[in-house]
């Protein structure tokens, strides 16, 4: 059996490896790098983003004073950026400095990275009726480290809400300028992980409930919410779905599932993504969890992947020219960043297109010459060739014409409006 904690701590060992391999390089000049993350592949040309700090009045903060706060960043297609509108940096100055230092990179290396998204609050009337998808990060990982995935989904018309979990992520900056630094200990036990896990599940549920504030605006289809995440975030997506029927579908990218969540039906469609070392025949938490599920439940293995593949790490590794650095393959696998983005985007969209929108499954559970890296792991007693099912998800009537004054989050107006 794969120890849960060993799967979780993989990402936190990246810094040590990079640090060991670049300590000599950091004294010399940094190698020239392309500083803009690759463009998303979807038909929508422009991506907008904005973030908000939300306070949960029902939960005291276990690591600090006051009530629990989370930072949520949304990504969506926009008609066009305003003139003079600038592309957002990949990381804030604080997080960029912190991660560059933690990864042992020359000062500020990551601060030069830029996204493809504009700080823009209005998707424009064309984009009413978007399908919302909530994302939860891997343990200790700031939300920004999955930006290529958010931009991919936004470029295909989805609205992604990424939840940054304060005191878990390396650092989270609130809108009032205060910063919550990670309290994840280096010697992580299953017991401590469970504590962070429970907080995250509540964070994701809280955000799903807060989306209700968009009900009047008709900007989003709030009865067809998706949830996905990486590592502990993928398990958190499963945990958040339990008993929440509006979250119709979820994806867990390579995260162990245990505790009560491991024994509970998510009451929705669910896709597991694993690696050649990590599947439900070796991870007993996946095996027992899968056997508990009553709904559509599939598990795919991505050949050439390691745990860190399901993030921007392979892309960052390629941008920095670190592919040959010893230890990198153990963390992100052999698949290049370009391929990883293309493959993950295709399968994530195939799944949510089917489970949320009611499109036909085109890739999942079929032999596909385009993606020979993908294989499936059957559940005990399952037929080896399962035909793609048609969605029973009802198509919501498209009546997205009402004007909108933005969503009111307990007095805070998030001016994300059509
Ligand atoms: C890193 O660069 C910033 C300016 O870009 C500077 O203020 C800071 O002192 C530098 N830090 C180190 C450790 O050199
Ligand atoms: C974690 O390690 C520190 C220092 O080695 C030790 O003091 C602490 O008791 C450990 N915590 C746990 C939960 O094992
Ligand atoms: C599951 O993982 C194990 C260990 O890596 C591997 O030997 C096995 O072939 C995998 N099973 C499937 C069905 O992919």
Image (tube, rainbow, N blue to C red):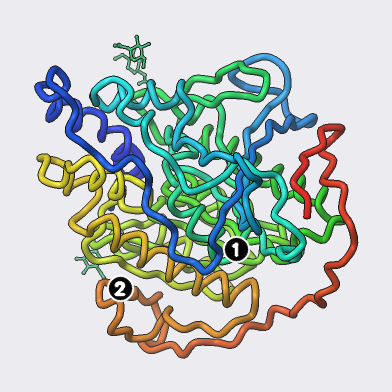
Residue closest to the eye, 283 or 357: 357
Please give left or right for residue 351 compared with residue 319 in the image.
Answer: right
Q: CA distance from mark 1 to mark 2?
A: 25 Å
The residue positioned 75% from the left and 50% from the top of the image is 211
The residue positioned 44% from the left and 37% from the top of the image is 90
Instruction: Indicate whether 388 appears above or below 319.
Output: below
Residue closest to the eye, 94 or 44: 44
Which image quadrant is residue 46 in?
bottom right
Q: Quadrant of ligand 3?
A: bottom left
Neighbor class of circle 1 (other Cα within 10 Å; few <14, some 14-19, many 20+) is some
Please give left or right for residue 398 compared with residue 44 in the image.
Answer: right
Furthest toward the front, the residue is 83
Mark earlier in primary sequence (1, 2)? 1
Counting from the top left corner in percent of width and height, residue 321 is at 18, 43
Assign a secondary structure to mark 1.
loop
Please give left or right for residue 127 compared with residue 287 in the image.
Answer: right
Residue contact between numbered discs 1 and 2, judged by CB atoms under 8 Å: no
Badge 2 is on which residue? 374
């Amino acid at each position: 059996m794969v120890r849960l904690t060993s799967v979780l701590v993989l990402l936190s060992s990246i810094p040590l490896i990079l640090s060991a391999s670049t300590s000599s390089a950091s004294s010399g000049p940094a190698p020239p790098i392309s500083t803009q993350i690759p463009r998303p592949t979807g038909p929508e040309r422009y991506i907008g983003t904005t973030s908000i700090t939300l306070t949960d009045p029902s939960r005291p903060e276990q690591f600090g004073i006051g009530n629990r706060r989370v930072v949520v960043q949304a990504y969506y297609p926009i008609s066009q950026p305003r003139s003079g509108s600038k592309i957002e940096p990949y990381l804030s100055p604080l997080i960029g400095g912190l991660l560059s230092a933690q990864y042992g990179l020359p000062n500020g290396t990551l601060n030069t990275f830029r996204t493809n998204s504009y700080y823009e609050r209005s998707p424009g009337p064309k984009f009413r009726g978007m399908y919302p998808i909530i994302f939860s990060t891997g343990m200790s990982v700031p939300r920004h480290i999955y930006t290529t995935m958010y931009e991919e989904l936004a470029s295909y018309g989805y609205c992604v809400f990424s939840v940054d979990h304060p005191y878990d992520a390396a650092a989270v900056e609130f809108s009032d300028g205060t910063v919550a630094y990670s309290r994840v200990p280096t010697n992580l036990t299953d017991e401590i992980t469970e504590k962070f896990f429970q907080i995250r599940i509540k964070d994701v549920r809280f955000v799903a409930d807060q989306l209700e504030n968009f009900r009047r605006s008709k900007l989003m289809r709030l009865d067809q919410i998706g949830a996905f995440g990486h590592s502990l975030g993928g398990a958190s997506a499963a945990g958040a779905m339990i008993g929440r029927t509006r979250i119709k579908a979820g994806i867990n990218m390579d995260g162990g599932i245990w505790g009560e969540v491991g024994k509970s039906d998510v009451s929705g469609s669910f896709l597991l993504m694993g690696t050649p070392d990590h599947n439900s025949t070796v991870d007993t938490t996946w095996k027992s969890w899968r056997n508990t599920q009553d709904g559509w439940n599939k598990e795919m293995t991505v050949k050439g992947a390691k745990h860190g593949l399901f993030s921007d790490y392979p892309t960052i590794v390629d941008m920095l020219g670190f592919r040959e650095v010893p230890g990198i393959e153990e963390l992100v696998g052999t698949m290049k960043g370009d391929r990883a983005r293309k493959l993950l985007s295709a399968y994530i969209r195939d799944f949510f297109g089917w489970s949320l929108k009611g499109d036909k499954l085109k890739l999942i559970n079929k032999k596909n010459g385009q993606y020979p890296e993908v294989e499936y792991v059957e559940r005990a007693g399952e037929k080896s060739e399962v035909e793609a099912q048609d969605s029973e998800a009802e198509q919501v009537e498209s009546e997205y014409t009402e004007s909108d004054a933005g969503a009111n989050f307990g007095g805070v107006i998030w001016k994300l409006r059509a």
